[in-house]
Image: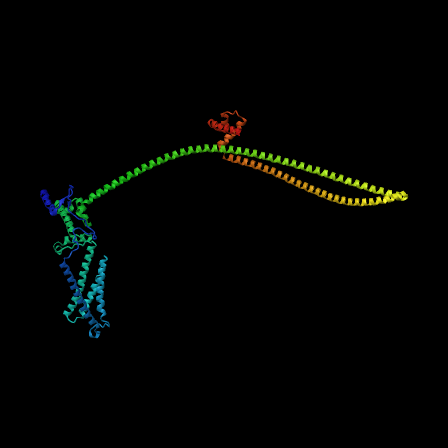
Amino acid sequence: MTTAPANGTRLAGLESVNGWTPAAKPGKPTITAPHTAPRPATEHAPGQPKALKFSKGETALAVFAILAATGVSSLGLYSSFAAVQKKAGTPVSLGGWGFEDPWMLPIGIDLSILAFSLINLLLIRADRPAAWVKWVPRVGAAGTIYLNWQSAASLPAQIGHAVLAGLWVVFSEIGAHLYATHIGEAKGRVRMDRIRLSRWILQPISTARIAHYMKSYEEPSYTEALRRDQEWRVYRAMLRQENGRLWRFKAPSDKLAPLQLASHGLTLDKALEVPDLQEEKALLRVQASDLRKAEAQVQRIEAESKLKAKKLEAKTLEVEAEGRLKVATAKAETAASIEVQKAEADLQVHQAEAQATIRQVTDQAEARSREIAEQEERRRTEAEREREKDQFNWDMEQQRLTRQRQVEEDALAVEDDLKETAETARLRLEAERVNREADQVAKDAAALRVQAAEEKKKEAEALRKAHEDRLKAAEAEERQAAAEHRTAANLKAAADARLQAAESDRAAAAAEAEARITPVERQARDLADMLRHEPHLTLEEIAARLGVSVATASGRRKRAQQLLDTAQTV
């Protein structure tokens, strides 16, 4: 193994094969060569033959071939139809098949062949070919050939009928193949290259390896597959040249590793790049892991920073909240004190208004009572005067009646005296005249008395009615006075109720104010009460009594002094 120069010469010779050159990386016998990666069968590979364009002569020739094939197929179908129909219509006793409708057998078979051939073309056009469909017309054609063979009487006739029927299958297969090729080219589908038969004969093992690679890994190009196989053969030759016949055992593992990847369809370049790719991937994984760790650390630091910032923000908010709470407490205490002062002022105003209303109502009630009493006294005095007047009129009437009776008695006495003397007669005449006149006077007096009595009766009735009216008026005035007295009493009761309601409002306001008073305000009020009785208390005594510090006691005393000043102002 000391023939290094010779080996180098041989390697140089191998390197020049097909333009191969060693890889630039020292220590690895890599070989670089132009290579095209395998492509899927649905892609159009560069260099593949595109759709053929026929010349006019070729087109005319194709049309002639189609017409000739159609004619031959028609002749084959017709001859098959005639022969099979004749044989099917012959009775069984005469060696036929005994069909009642013999024409149905050949027509049914021929139509099935035609129908399934067209269906196969439609499936190819839809790019959904089914392998079993093409076998239906083949089996039908085989059945037709067999029936034609049986229907012919001689061997030449049998061969003729079989050939004509078989040509239909051949033409339909050629048409399906051409149509499938046309559809594949229209859809950009790459055709798989075929390997020449001569190579199969000359190098069957490598050819089988190339065919296996093309079929297994969808490599349509035979040239690319051949180049890949050449790369691996050159690589093995280089390893054999470097390590001798036992190169499989002597070669380093890193140089043998690509050979293990050859069975997976990789090219030599790809296989040699695998270790580097693995190292790069491992390095990328390490870098990704470091990056993730760094990102996690950054996130942790950011989270800690955010947490600290949130804590500082929370502390700031807490301090601000405490400040706002103190301000709100001071405002609430001030507002509560103002509300209490307003409530007390309103209570005092309500009390003053209620007392004024009570005094006013009481004065009005007393004045009305005095007025009613005076009116009652005037009514009694007037009624007394009316009674005295009526009594005086009654006495005068009685005196008049008494004088009238006296006159009548005197007249009767004079009449008696006149009866005793002539003078008496004359006097009697005179008396009669006087009597007549007296009678007339009496009648007139009686009439006057009757009239006076009627007038007195009417006057007495009027006086009675007037007295009754005065009594009714007095009763009405008494009722009105009683109603006014009751109204005054009701007004007084209403005033008392308003006063009581004002007292209740004052108590409720005081209770509400007491409920809204904070402990600080309550201590200030208690201290105000203390200072009202003991104005010379010191801060130490105030702090001792309230149980607070001297500074707090100073604030309480200021507030208590404000309350005292406010109370004095009110």
Furthest residue toward right: 421
Horizontal side of residue 181 vs 12, given as left or right:
right
x and y, in percent, of residue 446 in the image: 79, 45
Horizontal side of residue 316 vs 100, given as left or right:
right
x and y, in percent, of residue 66 in the image: 16, 62
Question: From the viewer's perspective, is residue 479 above or below residue 190?
Answer: above
Q: Nearer the viewer, residue 415 or 547?
A: 415
Q: Nearer the viewer, residue 480 or 432?
A: 432
Question: From the viewer's perspective, is residue 32 above or below residue 193?
Answer: above
Q: Residue at x 14, y 60 (%)?
A: 60
Q: State how many labels appear.
A: 0
x and y, in percent, of residue 288 in the image: 26, 41
Horizontal side of residue 157 vs 498, given as left or right:
left
x and y, in percent, of residue 142 in the image: 19, 65
Note whether residue 383 is visible.
yes
Question: From the viewer's perspective, is residue 122 above or below residue 500?
Answer: below
